[in-house]
Amino acid sequence: MTLDQRRAAELAPSRAVAALRSAAPLAVGLGLALALHLGLDASDLPFHTKVLVDVGINVILAVSLTMVNGFTGQFSVGHAAFMAVGGYTAGALTYYSSLLLWDSGDQHGGFLGAGEWLFVGSCIVGGLVAAAAGYVVGLPSLRLRGDYLAIVTLGFGEIVRVILQQTGNVKFTADEVREAGFLDTATSLGGALGFTGVPTYSSIFWVYAFVAITLLVAHRLKFSTYGRAFLSIREDEIAAEAMGVRTTRYKVLAFVLAAGFAGIAGGMFAHQSGATLNPRELGFQKSFDVVTMVVLGGMGSISGAVAAAAILTILPELLRDLPHVWPAGVLVLALGLAFGGPKRARFALWTVGVTAAIEAIRFGARRLGVNLADYRLIFYALSLILMMILRPQGIFGVREAWEIGPIGRILARRARRAAP
Amino acid sequence: MSDALLQVDAISKSFGGLRAVTEFTLRLAPGDLQGLIGPNGAGKTTVFNLLTGVYTPTAGTISLAGRRLSGLRPHRIAQAGMARTFQNIRLFGDLSVLDNVRVACHLRVNRGVLSAILRSGGSIGEERAITERARSLLRIFNLLDREAEDARSLPYGDQRRLEIARAIATEPRVLLLDEPAAGMNPQEKIELRELIRKVRRDFGLTVLLIEHDMGVVMDCCEKITVLDHGVTIAHGTPERIQSDSKVIEAYLGAPASDLPPRAGGGR
């Protein structure tokens, strides 16, 4: 028995409309990435560009981990390991190919030139290798319930780190590479010192092009019958299985997809300007950073993961030179009072309190000549604690940004009217 | 009887030394509505768990329309046409009422995950067909105007009905209901009886019902099986069950002959 296919065919849009609806969001995403790239290029803000690249990479990581920890409710704490697998694969591929092809490990060609396409291809290969690693790790461990996955992924992260630390020195010339052969070259990844010399290709355009693809895939997955099957596993695995959901298969599928996107993010990370691919930087600390983003955003909320990734990446930079926060406080207060629910009075009080406290600290530090940047990690931790007190379910809870508040109410009303 | 839709042959289940179910046998012909009763801990829910593949029977076979089910994973059994509700409600609490039913339509989907990611025309068509079907089920169960609410925010009786709607969305041939009347008020119980009869008629279902509420069981079921300590102690029409001495003993804890005549005699 299958779904009434004749009815499904009747309800399907025409071929042309379907093709347009399938491709248009990606075109818009790539267009926005290009606009951002050109805009930043023209305005010459290297520091802002660097932070935005970081934000993009972290968005890919957080949204992909949302597929596992948020959608299917499994608990993976080894996301950085897949990032490392993808990053080292992509980095080595670009670097050594550049040596062989162009006799130099430096950037080759301009915007959309040959070098950039090599980089994109390497990142995709890195993603595929990471996805394969995800399959190998996920298949045995996702059959089990509970905390086993957390233990296995933690262990996998450590294994990857230790293996990478054992690799040989990076080769510097094409002759060295030719002489050493494939296997030796493939294991010359810099060891504990890190993989230096990977050419810089991670521009705003490419990072945000992959951000667009990641968001599109995550969104379409979540709001499809497959996404609902994923979410049902998070809600109640036994009931999901009883309703015919192939729980093990979908847990593995989500895990493989997430690992693949983490691998691509790793590729972007490897080709970043001024970044050294270092085993320790892609250790469990990084994994926990990503988990923090997912939890802060709200379990299963894509927009929440995006917001949390952006906030947690920008916040430490912002704390280097704390700006005035009262304009933001006033804005939040106004929005909260206008659209807030029954707890708006409490919310307003907290907003006023926190804003006043930050301004007081800022004022005090200025008067006493204390450099707040030295204490920024304390403030970072404090803000996480505050967030957990004020909104333990994460920024958007299990919903998306547009599903809550006044927009959500309007959308729900429209959906109800559309119902037959 | 070769015309049985669901045939259960002498299934047993032991947990270590505990024999939860011993040689349970049952035949359901197409369109049957049978009851499964017994005191607390008699093994009724264990039988459901065996039928739906949550547990694998230690011995015996289960077959649905001639196809052997014992040993299959629960999702395969659901696919073969057996759906259930749960005694302690297991809805997808954070999902909307509509999504709870739509999840259960998933097993009948043809398009692959790549089609969903590309959002192809075919997957959009299927998606709309799923939504249409889910809404038509919610209308039957009087839940349509609550479709956007979280399942966990529904009143108890509505949650029970949503569980039945979700089970039916899997397009089953056999429906297993585990204490659907538990926690319902008298009015809701009357409506539930009507609903069970109605869905059985409209969807051509064969139903097996676990229920503690004797009013519901005696009124709905054509035949009843009684379990006690995992052993089938009686099987027959409601009238026969009500006057069966072993059943009375199992429920009241004393042989019927020892009891004063009024309690022992059938009502």
Image: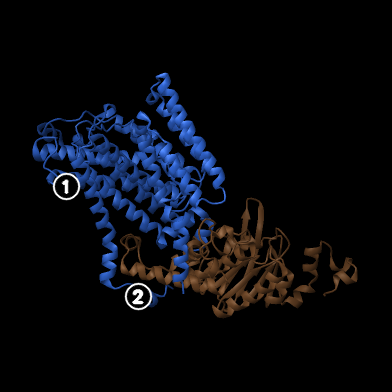
Chain colours: A blue, B brown
Please state which amino acid type lies under the numbered disc 1: Trp
Q: Is residue B55 visible?
A: no
Residue A279 lies in quadrant: top left
Q: Which residue is mark 2?
A: A9
**Mark 2 or 1, nearer chain start:** 2
The percent position of residue A359, horizontal first and vertical second, equals 45, 31
Q: Is residue B167 above or below residue A290?
A: below
Give x and y (percent) for residue B95: 50, 58
Q: Residue at x 35, y 29 (%)?
A: A321
Which amino acid, mark 2? Ala
Mark number for residue A221?
A: none
Q: Nearer the viewer, residue A259 or A374?
A: A374
Q: Label 2's element?
A: helix
Q: Helix or strand or loop: what does disc 1 sit on?
A: helix
Give B68 or B267, whichever is nearer the viewer: B267
Which of the pair B114/B18 is nearer the observer?
B114
Q: Is residue A12 above or below residue A80?
A: below
- Chain identity of mark 2: A
Question: Which quadrant does the N terminus of chain B fall into?
Answer: bottom right
- Tell me if label 2 and label 1 are in contact, CB under 8 Å: no
Q: What whole-number distance in Å separates the C-alpha atoms at marks 2 and 1?
A: 39 Å
Which residue is label 1 attached to? A117
Q: Residue at x 55, y 66 (%)?
A: B146
Graded by Cα atoms within 10 Å as few (under 14), some (14 to 19) or many (20 or more), the crowding at tag 1 reads some
The relative height of residue A420 versus residue A331 in the rendered view (above or below) is: below
Tell me the subunit letter for badge 1. A
- A170 or B89, which is in the foreground? B89
Question: Where is residue A240 shown, x and y percent of the image?
Answer: 50, 59
